[in-house]
Amino acid sequence: MSTVPYLQPDEREAFLVDHGMIEEGPCNDSQRDWLESVNFHFLMGYARHYRNLINESHWEGPKNLTEIQSLVNSEDELAAFLAPWIRRAETHLRALTVKYYCGQQLHGEGYLDMESWAQPKKHLQLTMLKDIQRHGEPYVQDHIDERARQAGFEVPEWCISENRGTWLSLVQELPLWSVIDSFSIGTLGKFLLSCGCQPCGEKPVGDLVAAELDIGKNSFNKSVQCFGITRNLIFHHQRIWMRPIPMNPGFAKDLDRRYKHFELRTTYKQAHFVALASLSKLLPTDCREKYLEQLDLFLELRPLLALGIIQPPFLKFTPLS
């Protein structure tokens, strides 16, 4: 297998021209500096799809670096717009988890006790322990240090399978509300799926959280997983334009009525707009309409970005005949 050559900065412009992504013509110094400042493979994700949209008559526009750079900048703006809403959805989901886990038993302990889980998973417990170990929040760290001092040993540098019991002894008395911010959204979703119904409770914690959010309990886990994936794509600066959604959470009936003309339950069910609109379901009720209105306006003002987010032509779903 032959190796793929690394393109030096002065070769990248010629590559874009040779592959029909931009028309021949010299880039200016500012554009060359920008070409050198972005990972070229990352840029190709935009340039290749932009070329194909024009070649297949889905979009009319000049093939030049200015248009591609503007598209990349538009997605940067989208990430900046989404960041506070994602943060609000995260804090809301964490707050609801504490509310329904701790409210059932009137304290915040026992969340690491797998014997009380509906679906005991040792790897999930270890992941939660690692997250708590890395948390670094003063209240949590002081508690860990004090427990280790009382037991007469040093706090282990790492949390691994072999010292799971030691870490459990250090953190198991910490209330859930003090450590919940250390869990990734993926870990939080798995915990909600696994922890089940707590003492003095009548329903599983995850079902109670889903009910308050008005999300069907059968699709709640997928909704949280999809949110976590989309959140990571945004915060890790990944391209979502013209990219299929990694996991479809199912499209709520009220959202489908609002966006019926987009065919997001059928033709464009892989569009990333499904995830962006579904984010509204994790927000407090009084925030949802404001978020959706601002999202609609944001994309309306950026039609090329909107095309690849809402109705990407190359991601059409065609049922088998």
Image (cartoon, helix red, strand yellow):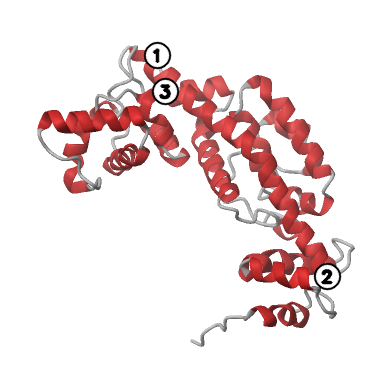
- Decide which of 241, 171 is in the foreground and name it: 171
Q: Badge 2 is on which residue?
A: 64
Q: CA distance from mark 1 to mark 2?
A: 58 Å
Q: CA distance from mark 2 to mark 3?
A: 53 Å
In the displayed image of the protein, which residue is found farthest to the bottom? Answer: 2
Task: Give the amino acid at mark 3.
Answer: Val
Task: Give the amino acid at mark 1.
Answer: Gly
Query: Which marked residue is nearer to the observer: mark 1 or mark 3?
Result: 1
The residue under the point 52% across, 32% down is 220
Q: In which quarter of the view is residue 252 placed? A: top right
Which quadrant does the C terminus fall into? bottom right
- Decide which of 66, 123 is in the foreground and name it: 66
- Decide which of 41, 121 is in the foreground and name it: 41
The residue under the point 64% across, 21% down is 285
Do we see residue 74 in this rendering?
yes
Q: Earlier in the sequence, mark 2 or mark 3?
A: 2
- Kindly state the secondary structure of the residue where label 3 is placed: helix
Q: In which quarter of the view is residue 113 placed? A: top left
User: Residue 16 in the image: x percent, y percent?
Assistant: 74, 77
Q: Badge 3 is on which residue?
A: 205
Q: Are marks 1 and 2 in contact (CB under 8 Å)?
A: no
Query: Which marked residue is nearer to the observer: mark 1 or mark 2?
Result: 2
The residue under the point 37% across, 14% down is 104
Q: Badge 1 is on which residue?
A: 103
- Decide which of 179, 233 is in the foreground and name it: 179
User: Residue 18 in the image: x percent, y percent?
Assistant: 76, 83
The residue under the point 77% across, 64% down is 68
Neighbourhood count class around disc 1 (C-alpha, 10 Å): few under 14, some 14–19, many 20 upward: some
Q: Earlier in the sequence, mark 1 or mark 2?
A: 2
Above or below 83: residue 202: above
Task: Give the amino acid at mark 2.
Answer: Asn
